[in-house]
Image: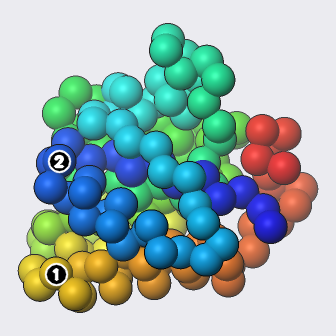
C-alpha cells in the first residue's frame, strides 16, 4: 500500500481543520501529522526533540506564510537534504503572486496549489492533490531513503 503519512505545515487552525476534513475520506486512509511552523516541521522531519519516533511522510502540504523558519527556508532545507529530498512537497497557499510561484519551484517544490476561496473547491483541491501524490505518482525506488521504503 505504500507510505500513507502526510505532514501538514500550516499555522492557521481553520485551514488545518479543512485539510484534515478533505483527507479523512481518502481510501486507503492516510495518517495526518501537523506542524505549526517551519521549525517544528524540520524537527518532525529530522526526528528531533519530541519527534524522535515520527514517521517519515510521503507528502507535505506546506503553507508559504509561516512563523519561525519560514516556508522557503524549510523547502530549501528539505530539498538540500538527501534523506528529505524524495518527500513530495506541495505548496498550498493563498498567495497568487507570480514571484512566490517562481520561488517555490526554484526551491524544488513538487507542486504549487492556490487555496481556493470556496469550501467545496478547497476540499476537492486538497483531496485531488493528495490522491495524485499518494496513489498515482511514482517515486523512483532507489531515490527513497531507508525511512521511506
Closer to the camera in the image, 112 or 32: 32
Residue receiving disc 1 = 119
Which quarter of the rendered picture does the N terminus lie within?
bottom right
Give the mark nearer the N terminus: 2 vs 1.
2
Closer to the camera in the image, 36 or 140: 36
The extreme right residue here reads 142
Pointer 2 with pointer 1, Cβ within 8 A: no
Per the rendering, the mark at residue 44 is none
Residue at x 54%, y 16% (from the top left corner):
48
Dot 2: element: helix
Residue 93 in sight from this viewpoint: yes
Residue at x 59%, y 23% (from the top left corner):
47
Dividing the picture into quadrants, the one containing residue 70 is top left
Q: How many marks?
A: 2
Closer to the camera in the image, 38 or 33: 33
Per the rendering, the mark at residue 13 is 2
Residue 98 in sight from this viewpoint: no
Which x, y percent locates residue 34? 38, 42
Q: Residues within 10 Å of mark 1 (few under 14, many from 20)?
A: few
Residue 117 is left or right of residue 38, and the answer is left
- Image height of 108 relative to 55, above or below: below
The extreme top residue here reads 49
Q: Residues within 10 Å of mark 2 (few under 14, many from 20)?
A: few
Which x, y percent locates residue 6? 52, 54
Dividing the picture into quadrants, the one containing residue 76 is top left
Dot 1: element: helix
Dividing the picture into quadrants, the one containing residue 45 is top right
Residue at x 46%, y 43% (from the top left corner):
33
Amino acid at each position: 500500500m505504500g507510505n500513507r503519512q502526510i505532514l501538514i505545515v500550516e499555522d492557521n487552525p481553520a485551514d488545518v481543520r479543512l485539510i484534515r476534513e478533505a483527507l479523512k475520506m481518502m481510501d486507503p486512509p492516510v495518517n495526518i501529522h501537523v506542524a505549526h511552523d517551519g521549525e517544528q516541521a524540520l524537527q518532525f522531519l529530522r526526528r528531533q526533540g519530541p519527534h524522535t519516533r515520527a514517521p517519515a511522510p510521503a507528502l507535505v502540504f506546506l503553507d508559504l506564510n509561516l512563523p519561525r523558519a519560514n516556508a522557503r527556508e524549510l523547502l530549501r532545507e528539505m530539498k538540500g537534504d538527501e534523506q528529505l529530498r524524495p518527500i513530495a512537497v506541495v505548496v498550498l497557499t493563498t498567495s497568487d503572486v507570480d514571484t512566490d510561484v517562481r520561488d517555490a519551484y526554484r526551491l524544488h517544490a513538487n507542486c504549487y496549489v492556490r487555496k481556493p476561496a470556496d469550501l467545496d473547491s478547497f476540499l476537492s483541491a486538497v483531496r485531488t492533490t493528495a490522491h495524485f501524490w499518494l496513489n498515482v505518482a511514482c517515486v523512483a525506488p532507489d531515490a527513497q531513503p531507508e525511512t521511506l521504503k
